[in-house]
Image: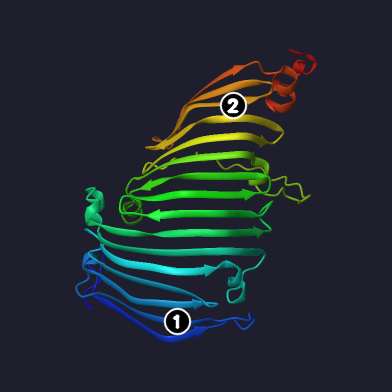
Amino acid sequence: KGIYNDSIMPGFGLKLLVENGSFKYPSLPASVENVNVDMAVDNKDGNPDNTIIDIKKFHVDLAGSPFDMRLHVTTPVSDANLDGMLKGVVDLAKLKSFIPIEDATLAGIIKADVDFAGRMSQIEQEKYEDFKAKGTIDLTGINYNSTSLSAPVNIETASMEVTPKYFDLKSFKAKMGSSDFAMNGKIENFLAYVFRDELIKGAFNFNSNSLNVNQLMGPESTSTTTSTTTDTSSLTAFEVPENVDFTLNSTIGNLLYDKLEIKNTKGTIVISDGKVDLNGLNMQLLDGSMSLKGYYSTKNTETPDIDMGMDIKDFDIKKTFDAFNTVQNIAPIAQKCTG
């Protein structure tokens, strides 16, 4: 109720009450049962900061697995005051029985039990003792496969602890085809990033015994149609976000990219302030070794800045020729060389 123009919004309100509801797709065997929702959104004067969001109850039973949520938000613009909880179990194998999912298979269990209460300013000012946040999110036996993947994705375990200061990824173990992954680390300032698009920080350790990049890139196209259309569009640089500060310490035993076999890859990758830094990424390949050091920056998105140095030692000439098309084009004589 009120005036609406470019600078003023009217007051508004919304109430939703559902008791013992359910819904079911006619073509599927199961239904979502025991749907209970008590939600209200209220704004009396049109000022967005005076909006009150109150989800007193949200409960559903997903094929016998309960899921509950509660959320109360005031002053969402100036200093969001949050009070909520999330608790539930989702059995992914049962989703297909009540939600249509085509060309994909799912399995595994997701468990969440999280409580939070406090103001965003308490996190921004690092007064973590004043902001309540505790809980866990666990994934077990996750399996996902679809026609768009070259191999199924299997997440053996993933465990995250929620605290006011950070989200702690205590463990993450997964496989995809012949590739395996293990990771742990912490994410800081997550809520401020979600609600205010502020800087998110993280530090992770990534380990893999075998990484097949060819499989991770997806299945090859089976189309035999040859396109004669010329692409006249200009290339767009990949923009590195400026509100991300991530450090990734990587150790990869064996890495396969195209026909190139790379061993003992170790190094640190830092993503910060619109820039990707390679701090001495070392690897062994082509009977020799290579060290990469440099950066890629998109502070100026129109003209990205790249400065990359390579220290190459003892590459086998014939293997280098076979591995790189560029060498084949600019130095075809290398095919006849040894050393």
> As displayed, is residue 107 above or below residue 219?
below
- Assign a secondary structure to mark 1: strand
Residue 220 screen position, x and y as percent: 72, 47
Residue 298 screen position, x and y as percent: 43, 36
Q: Circle 2: is it few (<14), some (14-19), or many (20+) Cα within 10 Å?
A: many
- Assign a secondary structure to mark 2: strand
Q: Looking at the image, which is closer to me, 20 or 298? A: 20
**Amino acid type, callout 1:** Val
**Amino acid type, callout 2:** Met
Query: Residue, x 48% and y 39% (percent of image)?
Result: 205
Label 1, label 2: how far apart the Cα atoms are:
55 Å
Q: Name the residue that disc number 2 marks.
A: 283
Q: Name the residue that disc number 1 marks.
A: 35
Q: Circle 1: is it few (<14), some (14-19), or many (20+) Cα within 10 Å?
A: some
Please indicate, yes or no, whether residue 282 appears anywhere in the rendered image.
Answer: yes
> As displayed, is residue 31 above or below residue 213?
below
Q: Horizontally, is 314 left or right of 291 in the view?
A: right
The image shows a total of numbered marks equal to 2
Q: How is the image coloured?
A: rainbow
Question: Quick one: label 1 or label 2, which is nearer the N terminus?
Answer: 1
Residue 288 screen position, x and y as percent: 65, 20
Q: Looking at the image, which is closer to me, 296 or 146? A: 146
> As displayed, is residue 288 above or below residue 53?
above
Which quadrant of the figure has residue 10? Answer: bottom left
